[in-house]
Each structure stands twice: as structure tokens, then as C-alpha cells.
Amino acid sequence: MLEVTGLRVAYGGIQAVRSITFHVNQGEMVALIGANGAGKTSTLKAIARVLDAAGGDVHFCGEKITRVPPHAMISKGLALVPEGRGVFPRLSVAENLAMGAFVRHDKAVINDDLERIYGYFPRLKEREKQLAGTLSGGEQQMLAIGRALMGRPKMLLLDEPSMGLAPLMVNKIFEVIRAVAATGMTVLLIEQNARLALQSSQRGYVMESGEITLTGASASLLDDPKVRAAYLGE
Amino acid sequence: MSKWLNPRSAFGLTLIIVALLALPFVAALGGQAWVRILNFAILYVFLALGLNIVVGFAGLLDLGYIAFYAVGAYTYALLASPHFGLHWPFWVILPCGAAIACFFGVILGSPTLKLRGDYLAIVTLGFGEIVRIFMNNLNAPINITNGAQGITLIDPVAIGDLRFSTTTHILGVSLSGPQKYYYLLLALAILVIVINLRLQNSRIGRAWQAIREDEIAAKAVGINTRNLKLLAFAMGASFGGVAGGVFSAMQGFVSPESFSLIESIMILAMVVLGGMGHIPGVILGAVLLSILPEALRYGVGPIQMAVFGKMLVDPESLRMLIFGLALVLVMRFKPAGLWPSPERKRAAPAAGASHG
């Protein structure tokens, strides 16, 4: 469904991503793990076109999207949940979710989707009228995911959903991510929390200084001695 | 809109309309100078609401807004004065001024699309100064703007035989020039208020809000941030252009001096002091900051003469002192402005926490 070939990202002269190639199949959850500064977020931003790639190609559903403007991505079915959540702090929870459906015009279905998302996250329903900026970090992450789902995407790009959250909240967020994936949603997950990411996904890629160094089924990566030593603290 | 239909609101609205219509006659009791002060207050309301689109709605800090006002003013001055011998009617020039200012808005907007916050402020500030300096120096080799001397003898607004520069008698009521301008300005101000209100709750308005809050997230939900930012600049600039045209006609004289940086800052202060992004707040800010200094000018001098028998403090310097103090106090005690929107009020205590 998503095919990334030879993608490169550079900031000035510094190469953050050095020609990486990977793919995500339809209905699959794939984890891209790696340490801080490995180039994970740059990769995701380049795919979502929030950042310009220095080279390489990205195909989504067979279509080349390397030159598509970022605001057209959601209409193509690709939804980014940005790093650090990126909710609209001075809009209410309900307004944030409504913003997620900005490009859609099918009002009746939008309301159904809203109820479905409140079903995933009852917390958001309770805080419907509250400003997003006053929510806790975990609730903001729920809101960011909910908002992305409001665009009815075919695929979710999640950038560090566990970042800065309490362990209990991290588990809750991942429960929802797994539930969303179970509905058939394709997910590319970027995480520093390697264990949780690999436990939730089918396949994984390990990134190190801008390159993919290891790949395989998530279960086998969890058993890989190198991964265990470097990312699972064993 | 349904809230306007209930009887109490309708009564309040009628009261406001009657008060606004009667105001120039009340002010005229204190002399035509007060009518002129009122006119400038409305002109500033107009300008502040134009800037509110850029700063309040879209969150783009623009310190060069006065440049568009200058473009509108000079457009009017050049097309309706003996300088080029052109005397176009005002209803042709005002849209021209708006269009030209809009064009300049896009010119300023396009290179600054990727800038935010302080960086955008610096570039827009530079743009404002560039326009002023151009006005000051475009008298050679071809004399376009007449340089620092400015352009004089600008035609007043005229509708048929009704010239706005002189007093006319209609149905036994004598209407002075400034009073006529008052009604023209009031009509324009109501128009800009309605446009602002409509924009606020529109798809465009919500998209601007999203850009203001988080640009990457705005892109992610499918907002074309580039076009919408340009639109904000263009619309804000058009309003500035119209205001400039009316200013030109009202004064009969323009020179680069009227378009200095301090004017941009003044209009921005009106928006911030009143309540950024909140239309009633911005109107309040504009009225306060344009009328208070004048009231001081007329009040402080005579009071000092009466109490001390001589002038101790020059009213002009006192004005800046009080102005500065007022700004500091408002920022300390009402950081969201004197009359903020309900959302901002709710957000104000949590603003520090949400960015942590």
C-alpha cells in the first residue's frame, strides 16, 4: 500500500535519512523503531510531505505522491498524527475533531464517525466542550488520533504516540491503536518504545543513523539479540 | 443570527443604532473637532478589524500593516488631485485602492509564507518602512509621490452634487463636512464588521484558526496553508487600502509622515489591547486608543492651567506615558485583552501549561 524507495532527507548539508527503502502492506501495522535522532520522524514527515525529501520516491496505493502538496494527503487517504500530538489548543475537543473532517462534505456520515470515535475514546466525549490545550498529554494524543480518523484515511502515520506519557496512559493509547488496526486500518507506527511497538505490530524496521539496519517480523525482532541489547535494555 | 431576533436584543440593537446616528450631533456640541475625532475613531476601528483578520484570525504577526493604508491613501491622492490632474470619483478609486493594496498584500505575503512569529514580524516591519521610504523618495527622476511634501488639494468625497467638504442643509438639518464623513465611515465600518463576523464562523475562518494554532496539524487535516495565509494578507491589505482612501479624502492631504512605524504599532496595540481575534474587543480597543489620547489632549492642558496656573507636562508626552502604562497594565492583568473571546478567556490560565 505504501512503498518508500530510496528516500533521502537532508537538513542543509546534514543527511538525516540516507536512502531508505521499505513498504507497508494493506491492513498491516508496521513499526519503525530506533533511537532518538535516527531519522524516524524525518522519514514520516517526508512521506506526509510536511518536509521536502532530498531524493527518492513514495508511492501510495500505486500512485506516486512524492510531489503531492501536504494538504492534499488526507484526501488521498493518508493521515498524519504529528509528533508532540499537534492538537489545536484553543479549539474545543469537538471543534478539533470537526477540523479533522475539514476536507469532507458528507455531513451525515461525519456525525456517525464522530460517534464511533467517541466510542473509541469515551474520555473525549466527556470533555467534548473543553479546550484541547487543557487536556492531559494522553487525552491530547487520543484527540490527535481521533482527529486523524475523522478524515476517513486508508492509512495512519503515527509519530511517537507514547512520547511523554505516563506508562498507564501509554498502554491505553496502544490498546486503541491496536483496536483501530483490528478494523483493517493500515498503520505505520514510529516509536522509541521498541518493545510496545514490536508487540503491537506485524513487521518492524530498525533505523540507525538514517539507515534501516534490520527488518523482519516483529516477533522475531523481539527475539533478536541485537535488538534486545540495543533497544529493549537487556 | 437567531440571537438578533429575540425582542431584547432587537431593542438593544435599535438603541445602539439610534445612538450611533445621533452621535455626530452630540459631538458637534463640543465643536467640529470632536466629530473629526469620532471619524478617526471609526477609521481606526476599520483598520484594526482589517489587521484583526491577519493577526487575530490567521495568527500572522504583521508589523507593516500601515503600508497598505499608505498604498490606499496614495492611490486616492494620485487619482483625485491636481498633482496628475486626475479627478476620478471616489467610488471608482476606493475599489482601485483596495485592489492595489490587495496586490501589495500578496507581494508581502508570498515571500513570508514560511516565516512565523518574530521572523515574520521583522520582515513585515521592513516592508512597512520600505513603502514609506518609497513614498518619500519617488519624486525623482519622475515626480510620482511629490516626496516629503506630500500631495495636497485632494478631492473630497462627492456623491453627485453632495460635496463632503462643505456644510449642506437637508430637511432643515445642517450637516457639516465631518458629519457627512462620519456616516460614510460608519457605513464602511458596519460593512467590515459584518464581513469579519461572517468570516469568523466560515470554513475559511476555521481554517485560519487552525493555521494559527498549529500549522503542521492544519496541513495534516487538509488545509491549504499557503493559499489561506495569502488570502488573509490580501483581505487585511484590502481593508487597509479602503481606509487609506477615505483618510486621504477626509484630510485633503497626504504625506509619508502619516505612515510611520508607530502607526502600525498603534493599530496592532488596538487589536491586542482589545482582545485579539474577538471582534467586539478589537472595536473597543480601537475606540479607546483613538479617543483617549485626544480626550487627554483636550482635558489635561486646561486642567493643568486651572490647577497650577501653568503647563507642567506637555499633553503630548503625557499621552505616550499613559499609553505605555495602560499597555503594561493590560498585559499584566488581562493578558488576553480587555474584552477577549470566551474561548481565550478560558484558555488564558492554562496557556502556560499547554505549551509545556
Image: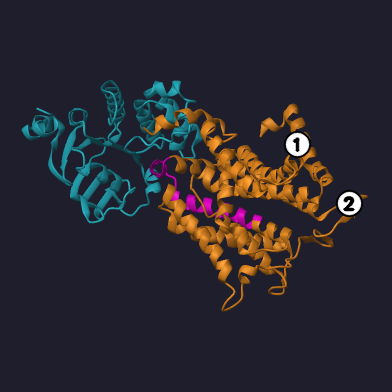
Chain colours: A cyan, B orange
For mark 2, name the chain: B
Name the kind of residue labelled 2 in the image: Ser
Residue B204 in the image, given as x and y percentages of width and height: 53, 45
Q: Residue at x 66, y 69 (%)?
A: B78
B241 inside magenta stretch: yes
A41 inside magenta stretch: no
Q: Residue at x 60, y 58 (%)?
A: B259
Position of A65 relative to A202 (above/below): below
Name the kind of residue labelled 1 in the image: Ile
For mark 1, name the chain: B
Q: Main secondary structure of the magenta part?
A: helix
Magenta segment, which residues? B214-243
Position of B303 relative to B167 (above/below): above
Along the viewing direction, whichever of A39 and A134 lies nearer the viewer: A134
Residue B356 in the image, given as x and y percentages of width and height: 36, 32
Q: Which residue is mark 2?
A: B174
Q: Quadrant of residue A176?
A: top left
Judging from the image, what secondary structure is the residue with disc 2 in?
strand
Q: Please identify the residue farthest to the left as the structure is shown.
A: A225
Q: Which residue is mark 1?
A: B16
Along the viewing direction, whichever of A118 and B216 lies nearer the viewer: B216
Q: Please identify the residue farthest to the front as the structure is shown.
A: B309
Closest to the camera, between mark 1 and mark 2, is: 2
Residue B45 in the image, given as x and y percentages of width and height: 65, 46
Q: Residue at x 29, y 32 (%)?
A: A161
**Dot 2 crowding, Cα within 10 Å, few <14, some 14–19, many 20+:** few
Residue A212 in the image, given as x and y percentages of width and height: 15, 44
Q: Is residue A112 visible?
A: no
Judge from the rendering whether residue A185 lies leftward or rightward of residue B67; answer left or right. Answer: left
